[in-house]
Structure formats: structure tokens, C-alpha cells
């Protein structure tokens, strides 16, 4: 089962990161966390790695509804969205909440996961149509 929704984009890495932020915002997501993987690996392990960023995206309304339905769901939040380069190509991908939450036996969460996933896919697709 595919746990991510990924698209290759014809943008530079920097432009893809900027557009990803914009598209997430259009869908009601804020960025709660940000990890520059390339920079972190260089600082911690002194290794070189491709451009790679992890954005922890959160839609406050859906997060609140999810927490009301299942207190421990915070273990699966926020929704991670990545932008990275590989082999000279740039990719944008988002976690699929329907897959991430499929192991949680809660029908309320299942419905919310479908809605959140639709918004994340729309954001990723918005970056690719730039």
C-alpha cells in the first residue's frame, strides 16, 4: 500500500519548497515543524546529502477534531510533507493519512483522514501545476 502521494515537479528545489508552503496554506495547513535533512546530516554526521526538507503540516480544525476523537492520535501528527532532489529531479510528496491512520480502530478518524488526504493531494497537485 502506497503510504505517500508523490509527484515530480519541473521546478528548482527552492521554488518547489516555496510553492509547497503556499499550496499547503491555501488548503488551511500551517507548518508546525521543519527539518532540513541535508543540513542536519551535515552538522550531525558530517555527510553530504541531497536537498531534502520535511515540513510538518497541520490543519488546526482537522487536528482538533482528530484529538477529540482519539487523544493518542497526536502520535501520528502532524502530516509530513517532503520536498527533495534526487538524480537532478525535484519531488514533492505528502503522507497519506488514510494509510497512516488505518491501524487506528476509530470510524471518526477514518472519515477525517479521507478529508485531510484530499486536501494534501490538492496541495501537492497545486505545486505540480505551477
Image: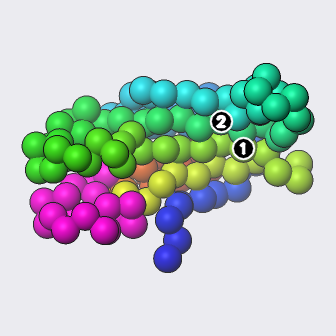
Magenta stretch bounds: 98-116
At mark 2, the secondary structure is: strand
Q: Which quadrant of the figure has residue 32?
A: top left
Mark 1 or mark 2: whose residue is earlier in sequence = 2
The residue drawn where x is 79% and y is 23% is: 43
Q: Please state if 65 lies on the left or on the right of 88 as rendered.
A: left
Vertical placement of residue 124 versus 19, above or below: below
Which image quarter holds the C terminus? Answer: top right
Q: Residue at x 55, y 28 (%)?
A: 34
Residue 48 visible in the picture: yes
| Residue 26 on image: x %, y % | 40, 34
Observer-nearest residue: 4 or 91?
Answer: 4
The numbered disc on residue 53 is 2
Percent coordinates x, y for residue 66 in the rendering:
19, 46
| Residue 16 seen in the current view | no
Q: Residue at x 36, y 35 (%)?
A: 58
Q: Are marks 1 and 2 in contact (CB under 8 Å)?
A: yes
- Tell me what residue is drawn at x 87 percent, y 29 percent: 46
Vertically, is 5 above or below 124? below
| Quarter of the view holding residue 11 | top right
Tell me the CA gap for discs 1 and 2. Answer: 6 Å
Taking the view exactly as shown, the residue that stands out farthest to the front is 45
Where does residue 127 sit, x and y in percent of width and height?
Answer: 58, 44
State the residue position of label 1. Answer: 84
Amino acid at each position: 500500500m502506497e503510504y505517500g502521494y508523490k509527484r515530480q515537479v519541473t521546478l528548482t528545489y527552492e521554488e518547489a519548497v516555496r510553492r509547497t508552503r503556499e499550496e499547503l496554506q491555501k488548503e488551511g495547513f500551517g507548518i508546525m515543524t521543519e527539518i532540513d535533512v541535508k543540513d542536519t546530516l551535515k552538522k550531525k554526521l558530517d555527510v553530504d546529502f541531497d536537498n531534502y526538507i520535511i515540513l510538518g503540516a497541520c490543519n488546526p480544525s482537522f487536528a482538533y477534531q482528530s484529538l477529540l476523537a482519539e487523544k493518542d492520535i497526536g502520535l501520528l501528527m502532524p502530516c509530513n510533507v517532503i520536498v527533495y532532489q534526487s538524480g537532478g529531479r525535484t519531488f514533492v510528496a505528502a503522507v497519506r493519512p488514510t494509510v497512516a491512520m488505518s491501524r487506528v480502530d476509530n470510524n471518526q478518524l477514518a472519515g477525517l483522514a479521507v478529508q485531510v488526504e484530499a486536501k494534501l493531494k490538492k496541495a501537492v497537485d497545486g505545486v505540480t501545476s505551477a
